[in-house]
Amino acid sequence: MPEFTLPKTYDFRDAEQRLYRWWEENGWFKPENARNPDGKPFVISIPPPNVTGVLHQGHALFVALEDLMIRYHRMKGRAALWVPGTDHAGIATQLQVEKKLLAEGKSREEIGREAFLKECWDWTHKHHDRIISQLKRLGASCDWDRERFTLDEGLSRAVREAFVRLYRMGLIYRDEYIVNWSPGLQTAVSDVEVEYTEEQGTLYYFKYPIAGHDISEGPGQGYIPVATTRPETILGDTAVAVHPDDERYRHLIGKTALVPILNRPIPIIHDTYVDMEFGTGALKITPGHDPNDFEIGRRHGLQVINIMNKDATLNENAGPYAGLDRFEARKRLWEDMKQAGLVIKEEPYTMQVPRSQRGGEIIEPLVSKQWFVNVKPMAEMGLAAVRTGRIQIIPKRFEKIYFNWLENIRPWCISRQLWWGHRIPVWYGPDGREFVAHSEEEARALAEEHYGHPVDLEQDPDVLDTWFSSGLWPFSTLGWPDDTPDLRRFYPTDVLETGYDILFFWVARMIMQGLLYTNDIPFHTVYLHGLVRDEHGRKMSKTYGNVVDPIEVMDDYGADALRFTLLTGSTPGNDMNLSIDRIRANRNFANKIWNATRFVLGNLPEGFTYRGAPDPAILQTPDKWVLHRLNETIANATRLIDAYQFGEAGRQIYDFLWGDFADWYIEAAKPRLRGDDPDPVRQTLVYVLDQTLRLLHPYIPFVTEELWQHLPHVEGEQPALIIAEWPEPRPEFHFPNQADAFEHLREVVRAIRNARSEYNVEPARKIAAVIDAPTYGESLAAMRDILALLARLDPNQITFGPAPEGEKGAALVVADTTVFLPLGGMVDIEAELARLRKQLAETEKRIASTQARLNNPNFVQKAPEKVVAQARQTLAELRAQKTRLEEQIQALR
RNA sequence: GGGCGGGUAGCUCAGUUGGUUAGAGCGCCUCCCUUACAAGGAGGAGGGCAGGGGUUCGAGUCCCUUCCCGCCCA
């Protein structure tokens, strides 16, 4: 039942929750309840937020974008499915729980693994509801019955299956390898979890003594000069390397150097990796603590010495420095070397310092035994999928970045020395032999088979990198490894939408694992969004205090305002600056729609029957204009959304609703609504509003649904906008001529308003006008009432014909129309002449440039016919206008 | 060192197959509480698209180059 008493302003607080619940209760988020449930599906897997995280603008942006796509395709008739879920976020969650324990005076070691995991699960359950309800507040139309968690039973099974398959394919192996060690977290982290920051450091130059010589013999004899940024690693050196072509040091190759202080003998080797230009041209090699040195060490069969404990203090291999923290040891060792006369100099040096993406502490390259995935074969598949276009990345430039990363891919360290996560499905026998299996039972069976009798097995204590399970997300959430109906129907998914910052972490790994396990692409399109920054482009951070909390924004301005701001303010792959001003402006937009609807509803009589798309036969010029513009807007919006240009599409609909429908059509409708044939206007008002609400629904679902529920509908219409049909342009509403006529009316109205303002005519005063319009006279006459209302003319004093001679007034020239306003003494002839001359000068300037273009034979020959024709028409119009202006100037003199 | 993005109105940004006089929001000036909306309406000022060169009938849009800011990778 339409209700005609809407409050004056839109109260989103009441509407949002109520509507969300209503949609969800009716099952409209489910593909089974689509208009065509057996039709082609459209599927997005949510980028699972950290289950213990708090909603931030990044979430708001992805929800806005993905919900837009889901709602759009749902309205287009696809069986849309948005699979929701959360991520267990290994390190992040474990840290939070440890922090909580610490506050209670406990540690995870004290309470033990089992109790700790229970704490983690409690924490998870407690926080899960919060993040989910926050996603719902944004309007996310996910199918919550299909919600998953990366650590739930099904997904854990998927993880074990993936691990076992990779292992059996020989792509997973355990190795002593140099990894990025986080001393604070006490775990290995993968390459992508390390960020390099440019920092001021020191380059330390020193003398590497040569065995059998005295350093006093000088460089190249008694010692070889070496430079390093991390002197403490000297203690782990196992060689000094020089370039084979280096004249300065070539004679030293094969000799023995002595590690300072420790006096451990090490070889002097040659390797082309050494950069002769850098430092002294000689390189100390520390395979245990530098990734490059590790590689060189492998090439040369060098010993690996680990001088560091897991907490970044030095161990017994560091001799007298054992037990010291890494930075303290650096100081002490350098002091001691100074004493020993081994120091040459120090110089300031800008270096790239590896820091933990989480926490920011300095990462130590360390050799330890970890599980790795040989990603190379999968990378090849991942590369091919994008190269051949089976998967497209938007914006396209990220494809290059993706290629570059996959082409240079290195083994992926997947083991983490944490407790919260998927336990690595490997069990060790008494002799350390590994048994990889889906379960402990299976491992036992394998072991018994191997040893010939039952043995005690011990499971690997480590867990897997969180991204290992996220990498299975698009198919594990649909039931993989089982061949479920959902997997068959909804896989591959369609679009994967996420931030460009996790292209490597997540997207690339999903593509690779999807191709490997499911023999198919996990999605055909990757849409990457940027970071949401503050209004001046600074990263939002708690310490800065510039965080714009989405919850607060929604409390103040509503979810629609936030969504529309994010959607129209962002472009693919680029960061966006979010300002409250803009959110407020879009809140105002929601209110504008609200009031436009109030107007329409308030003008429908009791018992009004809406007949849907109006019959062209009953329409007048303003109706035809607005329907023509609606057609254009529908076509543009649809094209732009299909091209993933959501922002531009949103702006066009906004402009149409506000700038065309509200500002002009509604205004033009007013006199006719009071006239004797209001029905065509009413029909058109309802129709255009209905169609526009549809176009806006994917952007601002709440206010549009709320209003649409109040609109009258035709028999058999869908019960809710969320599942209503997406509009299509209608050929019968193609009215270019009437559209032109109305545009001309707009120009005339603007000119009159402008003149009124210029001559300070009181706003309330209705004035007369004499209109001379050879081309548009008829249409202007037909719209006399509208013209009068919009330009505040006295309808009884609008006459058509040539301007009266000798009367004082203002003459306005719009194309070939002249509007004479007999303002008598209000008009200053000189000022009027000046205004006309200025307009004439502008017109002549434009005539000249248009003429010049048309005089150019190249233009006429080479430019598209349409453009040339347009130029000719413009020229004709300008000339007519010029003639008019000259006439008026003449008349005034 | 390699790669990428950005530099458009006072501020924040749009502007995607190159095509009339480059747009929006906010801010600013003038006027208006006109029964849809003051979270509003009307009118207005304000930029020639970082600099230089080039391609083209035509360039904010394509190419080259310089400068500045930011990011990614090594």
Image (cartoon, coloured by chain):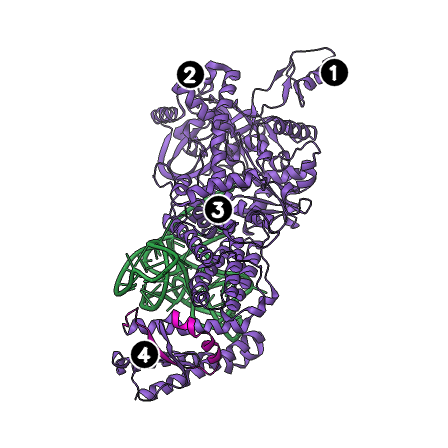
Q: Secondary structure at mark 2?
A: loop
Disc 1 marks a residue whose amino acid type is Glu
Mark in front: 3 vs 4: 3
Could you tell me how many numbered marks the image carries? 4
- Which badge, 2 or 3, is on the more N-terminal residue? 2
Chain B shown in which color? green
Image coordinates of residue A687 in percent, x first then y, are 54, 59
What span is colored magenta in the figure? A760-789
Q: Circle 4 sits on which residue?
A: A835
Q: Can residue A788 be found in the magenta stretch?
A: yes
Chain A: drawing colour: purple
Badge 4: chain ID: A
Q: CA distance from mark 1 to mark 3?
A: 62 Å
Vertical comparison of A624 with A727: above or below: below
Q: Both on one chain, marks 2 and 4?
A: yes
Secondary structure, mark 1, is: helix
| Label located before the other in sequence (1 or 3) | 1
Q: Amino acid at mark 2?
A: Lys
Tell me whether marks 1 and 4 sit on the same chain. yes
Residue marked by disc 1? A449
Callout 3 and callout 4 share a chain: yes
Of the numbered discs 1 and 2, the one sitting upstream in the chain is 2
Q: Disc 1 or disc 2, which is closer to the eye? A: 2
Asked whether residue A353 is drawn in magenta, I would say no
Q: Give the x, y percent position of residue A79.
A: 64, 45
Within 10 Å of the Cα at label 4, are there few (<14), some (14-19), or many (20+) other Cα atoms? some
Q: Name the amino acid type tagged 4.
A: Arg
Three-letter amino acid code of the residue under disc 3? Phe
**Residue A752 got which mark?**
none
| Residue A267 seen from this side | no
Q: CA distance from mark 3 to mark 4?
A: 49 Å
Residue A747's quadrant in the figure?
A: bottom left
